[in-house]
Amino acid sequence: MRDLFAVVMMLGIFGLLSASFFVVMDAVDVAFTEASVGAGISTLLMLTAVTLTGRLEDGERHRPMWALVVVFITGGLLIYGTLDMPYFGSADAPIHQHVAPRYIHDSMQETGLPNIVTSVLASYRGFDTFGEVVVIFTAGMGVLALLTMGSRTGIHRVMADSIFYLMHEQHLILRILTKILIPFILLFALYVQFHGDFGPGGGFQAGVIFAAAIILYAMVFGLSTARRVINRTFFKLLSAIGVLLYGGVGVVSLLNGGNFLDYNVLADDPVAGQHLGILLIEFGVGCTVASVMVIIFFNFSGRREFP
Amino acid sequence: MDIVVNMSSGLCLLLGSFLCLSGGIGIIRFPDFYTRMHAVGVTDTLGAGMILIGLMLQNPDSLVIIKLLMILVMTIFISPVASHALAKAAFRNDLVPLSDRNEHKGGTESSNP
């Protein structure tokens, strides 16, 4: 397929289908993440990238045969590897023997959260999640470092403004609907953020939804209008504050005499401490994800102004 | 009373599924972009709405009903506007509708935007 737009759309459809596959498998949290990140915002960011690079793929510079051979060999090896694995869904598979029973039986007493996924993600595996947040933060910083170079002369900006004005003066229906929807999207993001302890959701999904509202605003009302609303320095700061909040919770639990990210010592009651810690680190995750997504979008689409 | 609710719920679900199915057939069978848009844009909103209403009748829990109601309101808002935006984008990028194209060229090639 030469048309990159179609490729990106296929990827989005694949993300949505795998999200529904996860729902069928009863993994609603993963499905939520896949739907918002895989089908939603990554499709959007790739589309913005396609507007930068051009819609059609360049002519072939490589031999597709060799790539195909490599793919076949790797795929064959992977399938060969699955032959040793226990039968799908079998109860005595190692994954069901090791730590999963403890999560299922004890997580309610230990963390007081009905949603086991959140307690695993934020408490038992807090270190892994910290790594993920740092990766997202690093991605945002990488985009900032690579794309904010370039001369910002006034002429380009005026030209870009007029282009965006032409694009956006006409879409009356879209503008009105966007105005109606954005408060609800933001509200839903907050719901997902703070209800993640009790139902599907959490910082990652909420951050992406929050960013989606801002990106929607920027797409419909134009980038220069959105720049007036959104302080980019604030978003850069926010992405760092999220990681700092996460790490800070870990350091505070260290100072209180526990291990890094051991929330039991945050309050007098271990369960209350767990609750406080999970809430705080989810908030940190949400801040970082939302601001990094906004930063990436603004740098991708703002790049177009300086050809 | 119970049987009335169940019957009407089943009817709504059936109608909604039929509408979604016909939209899906339409998007495959219709010849060009605008007719496909028409097939799916019209049936989709009503189909999804019917399914949501049917689900609401199935469920006695008021919280679930309120959530479904919110999804319904969102669908009613978003789906037609999405169709509108798609069709407008196609029109602004000079994709000629099939009826106009036939007069000029006399051919019925399918468009692939």
Image (spheres, helix red, strand yellow):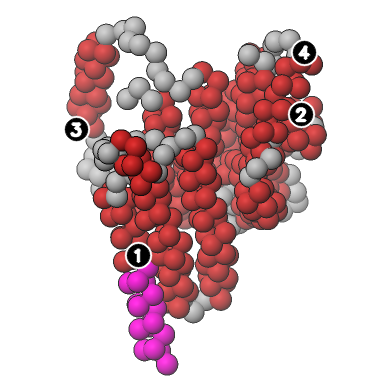
Q: Which badge, 3 or 4, is on the more N-terminal residue?
A: 3
| Image location (x, y in percent) of residue A292 | 65, 30
Output the chain of dot 1: B
The secondary structure type at the circle numbered 3 is loop
Disc 1 from disc 4: Cα separation? 54 Å
The magenta-colored residue range is B1-16
Foreground mark, 2 or 4, reads: 4
**What type of secondary structure mainly makes up the magenta span?**
helix
Report if residue A281 is visible in the image: no
The secondary structure type at the circle numbered 4 is loop
Seen at 45% across and 23% down, the residue is A55
What residue is disc 4 on?
Answer: A153
Foreground mark, 3 or 4, reads: 4
Q: Which badge, 3 or 2, is on the more N-terminal residue?
A: 3
- The image quarter in which residue B32 lies: top left
Instruction: Point out which mark residue A83 bears.
Output: 3
What residue is disc 2 on?
Answer: A232
Query: Would residue A222 be counted in the magenta stretch?
Result: no
Label 2 crowding class (10 Å Cα cut-off): few <14, some 14-19, many 20+?
some
| Image location (x, y in percent) of residue A196 | 60, 52
Choose between A189 and A81: the one closer to the eye.
Answer: A189
Output the chain of dot 3: A
Disc 3 from disc 2: Cα separation? 51 Å
In-image side of A199 versus A10 (left or right): right
Disc 1 from disc 3: Cα separation? 43 Å
Choose between A290 and B76: the one closer to the eye.
Answer: B76
Quadrant housing the C terminus of chain A = top right
What residue is disc 1 on?
Answer: B19
Seen at 22% across and 29% down, the residue is A79
Marks 1/4 in contact by CB < 8 Å: the verdict is no
- When the figure is inspected, residue B24 is found, relative to residue A164, above or below; the finding is below
